[in-house]
Image (cartoon, helix red, strand yellow):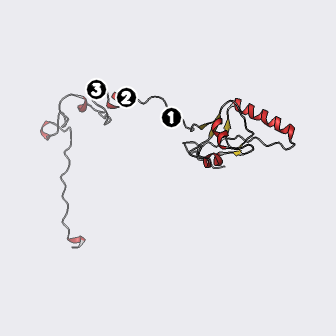
Amino acid sequence: MQLNSLSKIVTKPAKRLGRGLSSGKGKTSGRGTKGQKSRSGYNLPRRFEGGQTALIARLPKAKGFRARMLKPQTVDITRVEAKFNANDLVNLKTLKEKGIIRSTNVAVKIVGLNLTKNLKFNDVVLTKKLLAAYKSKLAQSSTKTETKPEIKTTPKIKSTKTVKSKPEA
């Protein structure tokens, strides 16, 4: 079949509204009589329920909020000291290898009060009291030996929200 042999598509012209009673769409122009839908400027959102309390307002609301930053995994110092020997390095990798933590993607906070072994901490967060006990242990060990180990307690926290860096202009 060729394009020139196709039959023409005949469309019926739309009725003109509001052109007198005898036109078929005069007086109320096919909108019925009275009511909200018959008025000019009528436009309501689909969610509108005619003045009844909307479904979105009837449903229960979720309480609280979800923090953007992940909470660190907490580990008690007694568990750490049970698995590590004196002068061992405690970081995310070694804690994972010993089975104390599940994931290395979330920061680790070590909690507790007393520190009995001389451990080296790296990439973990210590509580204030534990950090004070750790510094006093370092001060005692530095008087015995000349080499003083460094304190690196920078947390490795990954945000749940990815932030794109702005291009430099």
The tag earlier along the polypeptide, 3 or 2, is: 3
Residue 169 in sight here: no
Location of mark 1 (residue): 66
- Which quadrant of the figure contains the N terminus? bottom left
Q: Looking at this view, is 20 or 87 the one in front?
A: 87
Label ID, residue 163: none
Judge left or right: residue 7 versus residue 102.
Answer: left
Q: Nearer the viewer, mark 3 or mark 1?
A: 1
CA distance for labels 3 and 1: 31 Å
- Please determine whether, in this image, residue 58 is positioned above or below residue 71: above
Judge left or right: residue 102 versus residue 41.
Answer: right
Location of residue 72 in the rendering, given as x and y in whole percent from the top left corner: 59, 38
Q: Residue furthest bottom?
A: 1
Q: Looking at this view, is 120 or 17 the one in front?
A: 120
Location of residue 169 in the rendering, given as x and y in whole percent from the top left corner: 66, 49
Q: Residues within 10 Å of mark 3 (few under 14, many from 20)?
A: few
* Residue 32 lies in quadrant: top left
Location of residue 35 in the rendering, given as x and y in whole percent from the top left corner: 22, 28
The tag earlier along the polypeptide, 1 or 2, is: 2
Location of mark 3 (residue): 52
Judge left or right: residue 109 versus residue 120.
Answer: left
Q: Residue, x 23% and y 32% (percent of image)?
A: 38
* Residue 138 lies in quadrant: top right
CA distance for labels 3 and 2: 17 Å
Q: Give the secondary structure at mark 1.
A: loop
Location of mark 2 (residue): 60
Judge left or right: residue 120 versus residue 35.
Answer: right
Residue type at mark 2: give it. Pro
The tag earlier along the polypeptide, 3 or 1, is: 3
Q: Residues within 10 Å of mark 2 (few under 14, many from 20)?
A: few
CA distance for labels 1 and 2: 17 Å
Residue type at mark 3: give it. Gln
